[in-house]
Image (cartoon, rainbow, N blue to C red):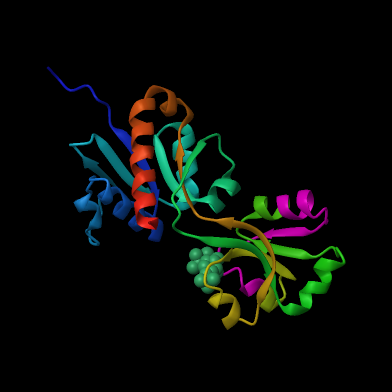
Amino acid sequence: MCDETRYLTFALGKGRLAKKTLALFEQIGIEMEEMKDPDTRKLIFTNEEYKIRFFLAKGPDVPTYVEYGAADIGVVGEDTILEENRNIYEVLDLGFGKCRMCVCGPASAKELLNHHERIRVASKYPRIAKDYFYNKKHQTVEIIKLNGSIELAPIVGLSEVIVDIVETGSTLRENGLEVLEEVCPLSARMVVNQVSMKMEHDRITDLISALRKALENEEA
Ligand code: PRP
């Protein structure tokens, strides 16, 4: 009889989150040895025993793969989920990749925030920045989209403040900036395609339970 189990496909955001995700999967007995080879140019990796496939993608593309069903499941930061705003289910807080989304700038910018001045805000996360200033603070600002090294913006005079991720705070400290307001806490999340959640309900919920248990054991 042929085995008709279909592959469950996972999209992982490249980098630290992917490494931690693989370590977590190992804890529940799912190994992806090939994926650990730093020299490999392969894009997709299969575990035949569990009928699972993993691929690495740019973080902001993970919710896209999951919404369209090219991946059943994704692992990506909450920041990316909020920014991309895709139609996907968020099913599990993986607890790692903890950091904060903050409004940052020089101490002198505090006054501008307190007085609801029409300031410029640079960010890699224009949707999150807009939601925070317009819907939570009711402050009209000009949002400038950047793609990286956001801390440069207030230093060179592109903007008064930034909305960015703060993890250890060392990038801010080394550049004479500080956290002025906190937007929200962040961590890595597991997301699921809405159709896959119905079609593969048992496999996916079993997997979520196993991962949740492994995470609880880690905490204990
Ligand atoms: C992120 C973020 C901050 C930094 C925060 O940048 O945008 O710059 O990390 O970490 P810290 O609080 O531990 O210093 P990333 O390294 O991803 O590069 P990018 O700024 O080019 O996006």
Q: Quadrant of residue 198?
A: top left
Q: Quadrant of the C terminus?
A: bottom left
Q: Which residue is pictured at 52% across the width and 72% down the height?
A: 168
Q: Is residue 23 left or right of residue 121?
A: left
Residue 18: in sight, yes or no? yes
Q: Pick whichever, 147 or 28, lies toward us.
A: 28
Residue 113 against residue 26 in the figure, above or below: below
Residue 26 in the magenta stretch? The answer is no
Which residue appears at 59% of the width and 80% of the height?
173
Viewer-nearest residue: 168 or 162: 168
Image position, residue 128 (x, y; %): 66, 52
Whole-percent x, y for residue 161 in the image:
72, 69
Which residue is at the far front?
Answer: 220
How many numbered dots are placed on residues in this image?
0
| Residue 137 is a magenta residue | yes
In the rendered image, residue 106, in percent from the top left (x then y), is placed at 71, 78
Q: Which residues are magenta?
A: 131-153
Q: Give me the residue at 34% from left, 37% from top.
A: 207
Rendered view: 10 above or below 122 = above
Q: Nearer the viewer, residue 88 or 206?
A: 206
Quadrant of the snapshot with the N terminus: top left
